[in-house]
Image (cartoon, helix red, strand yellow):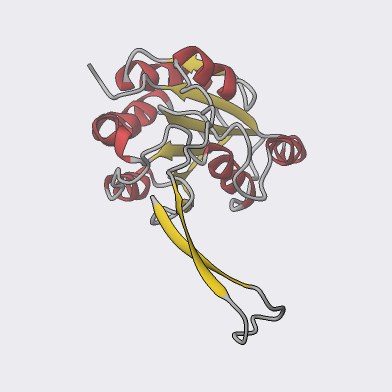
Amino acid sequence: SLWFSLRTFSEPYADYSGLYRDNAFEMKDLVAKITAPPVPDGDSDVALLRRLGPVYQAEDARDGIHKINDWLQDDLDMVICIDTTKSMADYLKTIQEKLLPSIEKSTKGFKHLRIGLVFYRDYMEEYLTKTMSFQSDLNLVQDELDQAVAAGGGDIPEAVVEGIWSALNAFDWKAPHRLVLVIGDAPQHDIPRGKITEEMMHEKALDENVEIQIVKLPPGGPN
């Protein structure tokens, strides 16, 4: 509780020539009734992500990596956006070990393939997004991927829209086929926390003729 005192005077303008008195008051704790938004479950997570693009609900990281092969085609520029918040720690290990070897095997014989990376976290973290420019040498992509660390986060939504926005704007798209691939276990913020909106993202993707595909991993990490 909080105590405070009000001094009152019989004469105007706090004139001490007259009578005055101190009046003590106690304020009890006031608890505001706030209805918190419901914590998203798996279905609502997917519903949110579907506002950004088609969603594949993977059983685990290996399943998601296997699905990615369906979207690979020759003459391709691809940016892989990866959630690097703490909840992705175990998934990230599998991604670092399996993703590039799988892509390299599936694209053997392709005349043109460039891959870029975007790591995204959330606002008030060490970084919002971090990028690596397009590379034709997959060994360079692997080296950068191996340096990724899963940390931060804490709330459920992450900066997915901002990650895609970085992919659309920070890369020199040239190939006839263009793909942004998102891998994560959490949806975007339902209400934007920054200046980038879903509408802006979709307009930019349309302008750049870029396809967006999302691999949604189960929340909470591998079982």
Q: Position of residue 104 (x, y in %)?
A: 37, 31
Determine the residue positioned at 59% across, 53% down. Answer: 170
Q: Is residue 109 visible?
A: no
**Frontmost residue, 209 versus 26:** 26
* Percent x, y of residue 69: 44, 20
Q: Tag count in the figure?
A: 0
Q: Decide if residue 189 is on the left or right side of residue 26.
A: right
Q: Residue at x 48, y 65 (%)?
A: 5
13 w.r.t. 148: above or below? below
60, 31: nearer the viewer: 31
Return the residue nearer the eye: 64 or 185: 185
Q: Is residue 104 left or right of residue 175?
A: left
Residue at 41% in and 36% down: 155
Residue 184 seen in render:
yes
Q: Residue 63: percent from the left, percent from the top? A: 35, 15
Q: Nearer the viewer, residue 93 or 191?
A: 191
Q: Is residue 28 left or right of residue 146?
A: right
Q: Is residue 20 left or right of residue 124?
A: right
170 versus 80 height, above or below: below
Q: Residue furthest bottom?
A: 17
Q: Position of residue 168 (x, y in %)?
A: 63, 44
Q: Quadrant of residue 192?
A: top right
Residue at 43% from the left image edge and 16% from the top image edge: 67
Q: Quadrant of the C terminus?
A: top left
